[in-house]
Image (cartoon, rainbow, N blue to C red):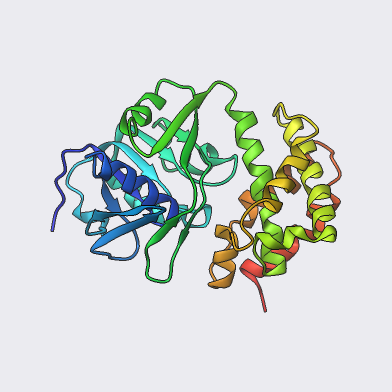
Amino acid sequence: MTISDSSGIALVGPGAIGTTVAAALHEAGRTPVICGRSAHEHLELRFDGGRIVVPGPVRTDPATIVHPFDLVFVAVKATQIEAAAPWLAALCHAGTVVCVLQNGVEQRAHFARYLPDNPVLPSVVWFPAQREADASVWLRGTARLTLPDTPATGAVLAALSGTRCSVEAVSDFTTVAWRKLLQNAVAGLMVLAGRRAGMFARADIGALALAYARECLEVARAEGAKLDDQVAQEVVNGFRHSPPDLGTSILADRQAGRPLEWDGRNGVIQRLGRSHGIPTPVSDVIVPLLAAGSDGPG
């Protein structure tokens, strides 16, 4: 079966983040072609006050794509980029704008080998969404994306205009991306404890999280992020004030026995710290434990 679609938009990776964006597009009459590893007849997004069902099916074979698209959202994790490469080849022409909905600060570098000539837009995802046991996605906050202010960003702004997923374009994307990475890095502590956000109410965990956030902050500044001293405490406070049962995607992956995005969320702090001559004593403990939890052996 081949695909023919007039929306000009495709999405790869209908997980929690991908489903949220697909639902926002569908609700606005811009239903994307959805591509992924597992076949589903539809996607479902639930939120306070309602739900959106996105018609499928989710396509699982890149060979069924008959034409490229002008805009492709890629919502796979860093551990899944290589597996998604056949989709990129099938969906993209030379001018396709590729918006990467992925954690970290290295999205452009990760996709350069697969899309050397395409405009690749990194993004910062600011909303909590989680996959439920019935394969639906629960959106637990307002959907919002931040992108760098470039000419290519206009394609994403137009696609998501008037939808429940707002988009802002900023000139200093480096600072915003590193601010989010501090949050993602500290969330890695939940993997090691096997607990959700309620654990940050503990004084000892709060102290450890603050020390780690300050370590990350020093590396972020060395990379050009303009972040004030109080950001580290703000990150910790954010977890303390979250619902106690709020999880994170890396914790969900650990509980399911899947590979972890430990390098893009935590290892990057250690790697770049070393390149700048910045001591990273907390990372030097956390990163090997996350790596072993993800990759073994044992």
Q: Dividing the image into 4 quarters, which one contains the C terminus? A: bottom right
Observer-nearest residue: 294 or 49? 49
In the picture shown, does residue 173 fall above or below 11? above
Expressed as whole percent of the image width and height from the top left, the position of residue 104 reads 59, 44
Location of residue 132 in the rendering, given as x and y in whole percent from the top left corner = 43, 66
Q: Is residue 60 visible?
A: no
In the shown orientation, is residue 80 left or right of residue 176?
left
The quarter holding residue 205 reads bottom right
Q: The N terminus appears in which quarter of the rendering? A: bottom left
Q: Quadrant of residue 165?
A: top left
Q: Nearer the viewer, residue 226 or 2?
A: 226
Would you place residue 74 above or below residue 46 in this image? above
Left or right? Give the position of 74 relative to 30.
right
Q: Is residue 257 above or below residue 153?
A: below
Task: Tell me if 118 is positioned left or right of 43 in this view.
Answer: right
Q: Nearer the viewer, residue 161 or 116?
A: 161
User: Which residue corresponds to the image point at 49% horizontal and 47% vertical from the top-left?
Assistant: 141
* Residue 167, image quadrant: top left
At x 33% / y 43%, what residue is drawn?
A: 24
Find residue 187 and report its horizontal and vertical position in percent. Answer: 67, 55
Q: Is residue 65 visible?
A: yes
Q: Nearer the viewer, residue 118 or 168?
A: 168
Q: Residue at x 60, y 63 (%)?
A: 245
Left or right: 271 as drawn, with respect to 152? right
At horizontal 83% and vertical 55% (from top left) the residue drawn is 208
